[in-house]
Amino acid sequence: MMRRGKGLRGGLGVVVIVVFLNMLVMAAATTEMVAAEEEEEEAAGKVKVKVGVVLDLNLVVGQMGLSCVSMALADLYSSRSYYKTRVTLSTIDSNDTVVDAAAAALDLIKEEEVQAIIGPTSSMQANFIINIGDKAQVPIISYSATRPSLTSQRSSFFFRIAQNDSSQVKAIGAIIKAFKWRQVIPIYTDNEFGNGIVPYLIDALQEADADVPYQSLISPTATDTQITNELHKLKNMPTRVFVVHMLTRHASRFFMKVQEFGMMNRGYVWIITDSIANELDLIEPLAYEALQGVVGIRTYVPRTKRLNLLKRDWRKRFRRYYPTVEDIPEVDVYGLWAYDAAWALATAVELAGTDNLRYTATKINSSNYLFNVGVNQNGPRLREALSDVTFTGLAGEFSLINGQLQSTLFEIVNVIGNGRRNVGFWSPETGLTRKLVDSGGAKGLRSIIWPGEPVVMPKGWEIPTNGKKLRIGVPVKDGFWEFVKLVRDFETNVTIGVEGYCIDVFKAVIEKLPYKVDYEFVPAEKSNSVPGGSYNEFTYQLFLGKFDAVVGDVTIRANRSTYIDYTLPFTASGVVMVVPMKTEKNTNAWVFLKPLTWKLWALTAGFFLFIALVVWILEHRVNEEFRGSSLDQICTSLWYSFSTMVFAHREVTLNNCTRLVVILWLFVVLIITQSYTASLASLLTVQELKPSVNDINLLLKNGENIGYQGGSFVYEILKSLKFDDSQLKTYESAEELHELFVKGSMNGGISAAVDETPYIKVFLAQYCSQYTTTEPTFKADGFGFGFPIGSPLVPDISRKILEVTEGERMKEIETKWFKNVEECTASKVAELSSTRLSINSFWGLFLVTGVVSLSSVVAYIGKFLYDEQRVWRNNVEPSIWRVFCALIRKFMKRDPTAHPLRRRACMNDVPVLARRRSF
Ligand SMILES: *[C@@H]1O[C@H](CO)[C@@H](O)[C@H](O)[C@H]1NC(C)=O
Ligand SMILES: *[C@@H]1O[C@H](CO)[C@@H](O)[C@H](O)[C@H]1NC(C)=O
Ligand SMILES: *[C@@H]1O[C@H](CO)[C@@H](O)[C@H](O)[C@H]1NC(C)=O
Ligand SMILES: *[C@@H]1O[C@H](CO)[C@@H](O)[C@H](O)[C@H]1NC(C)=O
Ligand SMILES: *[C@@H]1O[C@H](CO)[C@@H](O)[C@H](O)[C@H]1NC(C)=O
């Protein structure tokens, strides 16, 4: 395509002269418009005002525009015959070239001294014509030059009766946002028309949170091979959303290639700008077939009676360009804008008056032919008049602000079958709406039928499908295989698979994705060239493009996130220090008191006294051993009671009730002493466990060694704490860590290790009672999967990670790999809680003993009172006090009626005394 360049002006002069001669002939031919001729007769006495037309008459848009312009003039003057002016057209075919258009405009201004120029057709032709129009003060009115930047170098004499290309970018952004697509590739022709929209489009996409990973330029003269090559490139990219901005004649060929290449299938999204969507009717049926499912932004034209009338007359008027009526295309929005433009211009010409239709000659400067033009005296007035014209045009309300048509209502169409379907509207005020008059609530679009797949909304992103799988890098580990483990074939030593906790989580997450992701695991050999760097290097390989993702026990680190994108973490986080437990003997002098709570101690002591009292009451009247002086009696009873503690009571009890009480009591004593013994034994033998080191700074000061897992970022933490490299030892597995601890710092082992919580959990599960974690804990963000920066998989996978970690599936995976971890902590808790014996465990026993003892005493005293009823019934004594004293005296005495006493006393007298002495 032609581009404006420095050489243009120089070359133009020569070309113009050649073209100029031809033009005179052409102009005469093309101006013999049917409409103009008819008018000439009845327009006697009217002032003729010359207006130039520069259009590409070999293109439909030019032909249609010209027809519409003459229709507009005919319609206007027939309805307003009182107008004093009559616009006559001088038409020059600009032949779809920039030079012809420039020459035509120059010619019209210099030779014809036209009052205004309608045209040019394309944005490329417009630049020069706008400049010359500005110089000569001739309004330039274009209905199809839509490049937005034309306003930046515009003059006040340029009028655009069309929507500029940038007015639709927000609508495209709204659609992208509505469907939450993250990446969009614009495809546009590599010329001034195509790239004019790009900065605006990219801004709008960014506003809609979409990236533009690539821009595809298609030359207007591209060969089929070039298009195919470009499509091949696009197909291998993951992005599946394309915005196409082209002229319709280029688009037909492009989309046929797209279809041929299988990119009009399911999963793809094609959005076309208004330059194609406005002219859908012009696309030939074969190409139209290729557009199925495409979504287009189209200028909305209200359906009016006038428009219907125009459409009815259309075929008659447009006939001369087409051999048969069937070939005549429907009038499109560019034709309507041309109609409105001509209508407005003719109205403005009438308003501006005809006082001064001359040009004034400029100072002759023969050295510059091109710009040596006269100045249109009527220009400024015509410009003002045109700026102020407002009316209801065929394409909607007509009003100009800064020389541009103000109308930004678009309809969104979906290409289906031979036609199209309206799926919504967009305007800057309401955004996307389903209905034109938004009655609230009907936001968004109606359902769209996408290419290939009528039901599912495309994700807008796919893993490239040309047989390639996603290469997932996994770290090769020498230990902690619960997380990632390569499964090797025993015979051939070939890696046949990968398993482990991280791998299972990844698989579970991928299963949940709504689309299919093919992947294969690629083991990444570790290199230990940099201390603590191998995981950094591993993730860096992703950045270098060796993998498409990394999965494994890769911790989320700020340092690494500068070159990869992390998903959300799927493990608990944190870095802790683990140290061996130091065993400490229980050297407390009062440890023997610990097994029982003090309440239980007090209760037991109380019961010994109580039992002493009960035994005395029941025995002293019948048992010789419990007799003697009062002090003797007290001592014997207490002695008896307390000796039951070690089952050393020797006094024979004679009362049956006493025996019952004592048996029960002995049972209680048995239980309590047994429990006490057991508890004390455990207190003394289970030594108290304490972490051997509490302070990492102490290790640093004492120059003791500390361990970290090879390749881990923990190295960086330790270095930041100023540990020397000679103090740092690496390990690869739990067993190795244990060995290092066993060796001890003195012999090249370690005194403590610092690692991430998940590994430490595994380690502690294996060596449950020997190690413990301690301060300090460092912040870390847990394990996450890594993807290339900006990968659209990341948000999807993060969302699914949350689903998996919050669900049942995570528990299954955890029990599969870390069953022991739970058991260890559970047994530890059980151990800790078995400390002291309290009343709660024994009150039942005490209750039974208490009740039985009391009832025995009550029964015994009852029997005593019954036996001695003589004393209190026959009123031997005068007062109750006397009776009571008499009873007490009796009670303190021996019971003479007790047979066992007499018998036992005779039989056992000697031995009992002998035993006593020997004791
Ligand atoms: C281009 O326009 C000139 C007149 O300006 C005409 O003589 C010539 O035939 C046209 N070329 C084509 C390819 O139509
Ligand atoms: C394009 O048109 C829109 C709507 O009429 C307007 O807001 C915007 O300023 C125009 N852009 C340029 C570059 O003229
Ligand atoms: C004629 O044009 C030349 C070059 O553009 C310029 O230097 C000169 O001043 C012009 N002369 C007049 C009389 O405008
Ligand atoms: C298998 O291969 C790995 C590395 O690929 C190597 O470390 C290991 O020693 C090999 N095992 C056998 C049995 O050959
Ligand atoms: C990450 O940390 C390592 C080790 O401290 C350092 O070598 C590397 O340059 C850091 N990378 C970035 C991007 O900061």
Image (cartoon, rainbow, N blue to C red):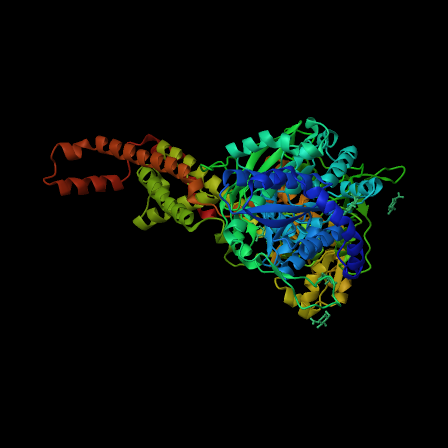
Residue 734 showing in the rendered view: yes
Determine the residue positioned at 76% across, 68% down: 367
Q: Position of residue 698 (x, y in %)?
A: 64, 67
Q: Position of residue 329 (x, y in %)?
A: 67, 32
Q: As displayed, is residue 135 above or below residue 491? A: below
Determine the residue positioned at 52% across, 34% down: 306
Task: Quadrant for residue 751, please give it.
Answer: bottom right
Residue 479 showing in the rendered view: no
Q: Residue furthest left?
A: 878
Q: As displayed, is residue 577 above or below residue 210? A: below
689 sits to left or right of 615: right
Along the line of sight, the residue nearer the viewer: 173 or 541: 173
Q: How many labels sit on residues?
A: 0
881 sits to left or right of 515: left
Q: Position of residue 757 (x, y in %)?
A: 64, 51
Q: Residue furthest right?
A: 492
Determine the residue positioned at 36% across, 49% down: 635
Q: Position of residue 743 (x, y in %)?
A: 76, 58
Task: Quadrant for residue 691, please give it.
Answer: bottom right
Along the line of sight, the residue nearer the viewer: 768 or 896: 768
Along the line of sight, the residue nearer the viewer: 473 or 824: 473
Along the line of sight, the residue nearer the viewer: 281 or 543: 281
